[in-house]
Amino acid sequence: MAKPTSRFVCQSCGAITPKWAGRCETCGEWNTVVEEAITARPGPAGKAPAGKGVAFVGLAGSAEPPPRAATGIEELDRVLGGGLVPSSAVLVGGDPGIGKSTLLLQAAASLARSGRRVLYISGEESTEQVRLRARRLGVADTAIELAAAYNVREIAASLEQANDAALVVIDSIQTMWLDAIDSAPGTVAQVRACSFELIRLAKAGKFSLVLVGHVTKDGALAGPRVLEHMVDAVLYFEGDRGHQFRILRAVKNRYGATDEIGVFEMTDRGLAEVPNPSALFLAERRGNVSGSAVFAGLEGTRPVLVEVQALLAPNPGGSPRRSVIGWDSGRLSMLLAVLETRAGVRLNQTDVYLNVAGGLRVTEPAADLAVAASIASAAFDKPTSPGMVYFGEIGLSGEIRQVAQAEARLKEAAKLGFDSAALPRRLAHGNRKLVAPEGLRLEEIGHIADLVARFAPESGSGG
């Protein structure tokens, strides 16, 4: 029986099927299954060549931590864990036009100013287009070496000779093409093969490799998931075009902390660092409006204060609407059920709109208390205290649970001038006493009903 010479591969998830289908059975995407040729494996008579074996070493060793090259952009270095590591591969993804190429060109220019050799290879733009961006950013005088190429075989020949390169930027991996693969650029096979070849060159050449990756309409990186496993760090560049803020988030980092963020502001001169994002996120906050609460959050190792806004509108007929921006919609539904069941706040005929101001997306459960406070404030039309921050996780029985890094959150609140904090009730058998900054009053809350009582009309105390 003759062996098949082609197979059908989903360009969204990489699933392989023996025949074509209009819809991928694995990921459910339509019109993503493409036929790809099967490359014959080397070896006489179909037999694989014998391997030479590998050398094993002991677990204990005296290897020094890998040296890092600071990019000169502190927010980027924070997300990377201190800078670029030689022989490492970093994948940067984000929506079109979000600023990926701008950020990397600024970082490349900063490294070039420090005397390091930087190579910038673009498969999407010509060298003149990159020069236009460099002039707009004010970095045209740096010694970055540009090339407009997409053939990985030709790029590899140049990189093998560039022994003194410190950084190589590939913009983007979806435009790269390897002639040994019989498929178009951007397909799963091409992205996988080109990435493997470029990462192999980075490991052998001791330079840092940065790959720019496209994202799908769902926000996931386009191409095979194996690409994220091949690289050492995966960074997502997030942001809303309606806001000037941009968030660089690490979702994988073999040389640093995950979930670390860097905050940037998009200006006409490129991306500017935001060293104090809390003050920026709260700059337009009005403290005398109901439905607003300040959440003392934690992004990686950085405490960040953001405003959580809630708006309730009556909806006597039909299904009530739940609209969320910057938070998990499923968690909002759970929290609304807890408020109604455990605290008696009737929301079954009310539309609920929730927004995290500033364009930041909050993922940690510690935001539960701030969200509940904003909803209770809107429900009873009573503003929260303008000098109070909230953090704490809410369970299904209505209890307020402890969260990590409480002291770091409190220090950030005190630094920005807040005078009180609502937080979970400390356990009597806790291992360590919580030390609050001087001048910051702590108000412990044990149950969600206690929080709602601060806003209910029969209560005489303010929230």
Image: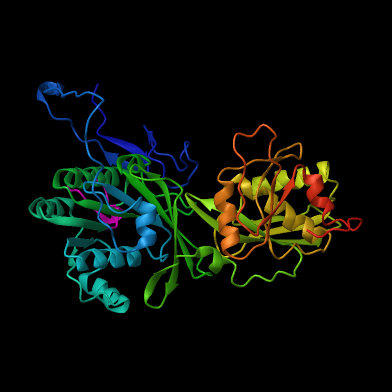
Q: Quadrant of residue 294?
A: bottom right
Dominant SS of magenta comes to loop
What is the quadrant of the C terminus in the image? Answer: bottom right
Q: What x and y, as percent, mark residue 76?
A: 36, 59
Residue 287 in percent (x, y) is at 71, 69
- The residue at the far right in this view is 458
Whether residue 172 is in magenta: the answer is yes
In this rendering, position of residue 139 left or right of residue 20: left
Residue 348 makes an appearance in the image = no
Rendered location of residue 103, percent (x, y): 34, 65
- Residue, x 48% and y 45% (percent of image)? 29
Image vertical order of residue 359 relative to residue 151, above or below: below
Task: Indicate how the structure is coloured in the image.
Answer: rainbow
At x 60%, y 60%, the residue is: 414
Q: Nearer the viewer, residue 213 or 70?
A: 70
**Residue at (17%, 30%) from the top-left corner?**
41
Which residues, given as a range, are shown in magenta? Answer: 171-185
Q: In this view, does 26 lie to the left or right of 212?
A: right
* Frontmost residue, 27 versus 440: 440
Q: Reply above or below: 417 against 198.
A: below
Q: Quick check: is 95 in the magenta stretch? A: no
Where 252 falls versus 55 (above or below)? below
Work out which quarter of the rendered image holds the N terminus and state it: top left
Q: Which of 452 and 93 is in front in this view?
A: 452
Say whether residue 109 is left or right of residue 454: left
